[in-house]
Image (tube, rainbow, N blue to C red):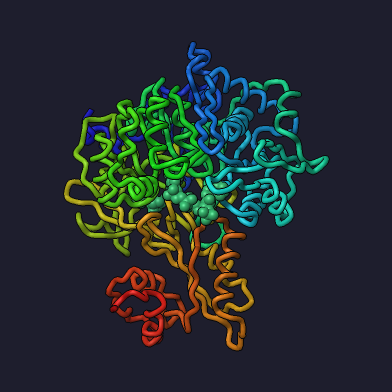
């Protein structure tokens, strides 16, 4: 079908469009209404529908006779194991773990925090929550105790599910001590913790609070699925905002199932029974949507990869996984391909594997640079599809839709708005920009199904963060433009969110750590371009007058503090002491100017600057290689 027709219908008649798409989902009570528009700017999809997402992801396929089809392949080069679970096998495990949670008193609407590495039990825990109508909140394993504690206090879980350790190529990362530390910091106390003990690290269980996963599962009876309202929350996923306090993005059950199923077919052109591999982590939105829910709702086989693109053991790891499991669709972040290209520029390792099963490579999470696009296209010989979206939307906003009639790819653009998303580029007064003119990328309300209905217990922040700047529109936080052909070009964030190796991080949370150091008077963290990771954070601090500590020692302490308090994933490796930070006359730090200087751009001196001489003092520190 031609894209233009599908898109036009989705915007002109969203009720008709999504009402039809909803027929692909199994409802325990079919919705009689598609969209509730009674309380703008809050919109609710399928308000009177009832369903169970776990039933749709598992039971439904087993009941249809596909119980022996593979649902999940856990490929773990870091442990040297591959584990395959059929739909029937995964259902059995999920039902039993749902029994564990039910016996711990978890019922519909209760929250369960999941802090786990890339093991099948993470998926089992998520689906078990969905089965009971409980709300999971998965926290990425690379976050440190303080970040975990903030999320625990916001979600207030009845139970936390965790593991003894994660495994990084260079080390075993003990998760259990981090969980214990987080619980020491958090004000909220969960009733119980269920701990998966992995053989690579022991875990001391706290008597009366902690349960051993294996023992609990052995003692449990399987639990059935419970119908929930389409508008009930399926999960909360915290994501970095502009402040240090993460935003709890809420996902509902009904709209999510409808949108993900639609996207699997029309965006990814994936088919039931095929092998779909999103090389990400269950702690990120890509993992939620395209490791867990999307492939399973479709009846495809999902690869859960516990490894890296390089170093586990080499830059041929991705090709091995594709050939060994017959992957037809691969989705990852450009940074993974930059890492492979850096180690094996000629892709010589490709010669060892048959990757003929691969039909399409999808990339997202950060800007796809032209070099990486051309390298991947040339070496793999399949279409390389850049697509753009965010935690809040839950599924692609702009893409080259592979399930519709082919559209040419323009390198540098994630192609066109996905049906359902009325993408607008606005100027500061909220007027549409002309083609080719940059502005704020916004989405006209209502957003399509599957996108965030609100932030967890914070309607006010939902409105103030996303909906108040341009009434009637959702503000994405990215800047960019639409060209004459309606192709979208995304230029990057216009706020203090940065993207490091495809991981979304807040400079605000790192600044909070730097500012807490007793020697620091003022600080700024900015994201600067990096060849491998896309962006990396850099910190700048002004020391308090009279501080006698050695600046180098302070900087090393600050790097350590960010690693300990935000997490290794923040990857803040460099902090510099500067005499002053450039500011506007109203006292706002000129971060954009600093970023430009750090990247070697010929930054104009902003007219709003308070003291232009500050820039001269900053230059040798921020961009020491410039002008030599
Ligand atoms: N648990 C504990 N620690 C973790 C972790 C986890 N789940 N994930 C990452 N870390 C640690 C890493 O070990 C590393 O620690 P180090 O500083 O001691 O080396 C640090 O966090 C930074 O990790 P990362 O940014 O991943 O850098 P890297 O150098 O280990 O790997 C890449 C670089 C490009 C290979 C890697 O980032 C990658 O594969 N990215 C793929 C992109 C991706 O998955 N994006 C998700 C959205 S699609
Ligand atoms: P996350 O919420 O972690 O998925 O991060 C979302 C942000 O990543 C977006 O707001 C963009 O800034 C960036 N991003 C995601 N995909 C792309 C893409 N294809 N091109 C450019 N930036 C992207």
Which residue, as the protein is rendered here, is positioned at the far right?
A: 208
The front one of 105 and 62 is: 62
Percent across and percent down for residue 97 are: 66, 28
Q: Is residue 454 left or right of residue 212?
A: left
Percent across and percent down for residue 134 are: 63, 34
Q: Residue at x 57, y 35 (%)?
A: 119
Percent across and percent down for residue 302 are: 46, 29
Judge whether residue 540 can be spotted in this image.
Answer: yes
Q: Is residue 503 left or right of residue 549?
A: left
The front one of 107 and 231 is: 107
Q: Image quadrant for the C terminus?
A: bottom left
Q: Residue at x 41, y 22 (%)?
A: 23
Check the image and report above or below for 434 versus 400.
Answer: below
Judge whether residue 472 can be spotted in this image.
Answer: no
Q: Residue at x 60, y 70 (%)?
A: 557
Check the image and report above or below for 424 versus 616.
Answer: above
């Amino acid at each position: 079908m031609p894209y233009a027709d599908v898109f036009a219908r989705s915007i002109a008649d969203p009720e008709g469009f999504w009402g039809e798409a909803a027929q692909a989902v199994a409802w325990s009570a079919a919705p009689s209404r598609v969209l509730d528009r009674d309380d703008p700017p809050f919109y609710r999809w399928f308000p009177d529908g009832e369903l169970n997402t776990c039933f749709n992801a598992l039971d439904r396929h087993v009941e249809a006779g596909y119980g022996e089809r593979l649902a999940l392949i856990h490929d773990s080069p870091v442990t040297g194991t591959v584990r395959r679970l059929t739909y029937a096998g995964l259902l059995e495990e999920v039902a039993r773990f749902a029994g564990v949670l039910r016996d711990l008193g978890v019922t519909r609407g209760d929250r369960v925090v999941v802090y786990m590495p890339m093991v099948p039990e993470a998926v089992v825990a998520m689906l078990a929550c969905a089965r009971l109508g409980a709300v999971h909140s998965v926290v990425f394993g690379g976050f440190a105790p303080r970040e975990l504690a903030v999320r625990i206090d916001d979600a207030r879980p009845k139970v936390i599910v965790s593991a003894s350790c994660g495994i990084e190529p260079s080390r075993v990362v003990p998760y259990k001590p981090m969980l214990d530390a987080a619980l020491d910091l958090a004000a909220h106390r969960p009733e119980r913790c269920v701990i998966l003990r992995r053989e690579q690290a022991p875990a001391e269980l706290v008597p009366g609070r902690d349960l051993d996963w294996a023992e609990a599962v052995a003692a449990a009876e399987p639990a059935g699925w419970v119908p929930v309202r389409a508008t009930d929350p399926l999960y909360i996923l915290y994501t970095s905002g502009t402040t240090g306090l993460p935003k709890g993005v809420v996902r509902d059950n009904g709209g999510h199932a409808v949108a993900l199923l639609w996207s699997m077919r029309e965006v990814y052109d994936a088919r039931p029974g095929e092998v779909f591999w999103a090389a990400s982590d269950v702690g990120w939105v890509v993992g939620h949507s395209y490791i867990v829910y999307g492939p399973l709702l479709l009846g495809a086989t999902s690869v859960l990869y516990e490894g890296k693109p390089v170093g586990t053991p080499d830059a041929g790891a991705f090709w091995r996984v594709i050939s060994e499991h017959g992957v037809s669709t691969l989705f990852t972040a450009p940074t993974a391909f930059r890492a492979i290209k850096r180690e094996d520029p000629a892709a010589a390792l490709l010669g060892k594997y048959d990757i003929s099963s691969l039909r399409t490579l999808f990339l997202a999470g950060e800007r796809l640079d032209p070099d990486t696009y051309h390298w991947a296209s040339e070496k793999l010989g399949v279409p390389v599809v850049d697509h753009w979206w965010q935690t809040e939307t839950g599924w692609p906003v702009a893409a080259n839709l592979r399930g519709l009639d082919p559209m040419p790819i323009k390198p540098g653009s994630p192609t066109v708005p996905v049906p359902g998303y009325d993408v607008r580029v606005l100027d500061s007064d909220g007027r549409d920009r002309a083609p080719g003119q940059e502005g704020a990328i916004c989405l006209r309300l209502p957003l399509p199904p599957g996108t965030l209905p609100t932030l967890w217990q914070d309607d006010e922040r939902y409105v103030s963060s996303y909906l108040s700047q341009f009434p009637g529109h959702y503000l994405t936080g990215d800047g960019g433009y639409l060209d004459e052909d309606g192709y979208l070009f995304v230029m990057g964030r216009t706020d203090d969110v940065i993207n490091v190796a495809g991981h979304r991080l807040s400079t605000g949370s790192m600044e909070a750590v730097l500012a807490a150091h007793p020697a620091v008077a003022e600080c700024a963290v900015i994201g600067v371009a990096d060849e491998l990771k896309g962006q990396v954070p850099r910190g700048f601090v002004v020391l308090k007058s009279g501080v006698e500590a050695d600046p180098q020692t302070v900087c090393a302490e600050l790097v350590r503090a960010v690693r300990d308090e935000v997490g290794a994933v923040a990857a803040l490796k460099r902090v510099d002491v500067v005499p002053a930070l450039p500011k506007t006359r109203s006292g706002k730090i000129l971060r954009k100017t600093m970023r430009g200087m750090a990247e070697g751009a010929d930054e104009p001196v902003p007219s709003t600057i308070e003291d232009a001489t500050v820039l001269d003092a900053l230059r040798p520190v921020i961009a020491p290689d410039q002008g030599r």
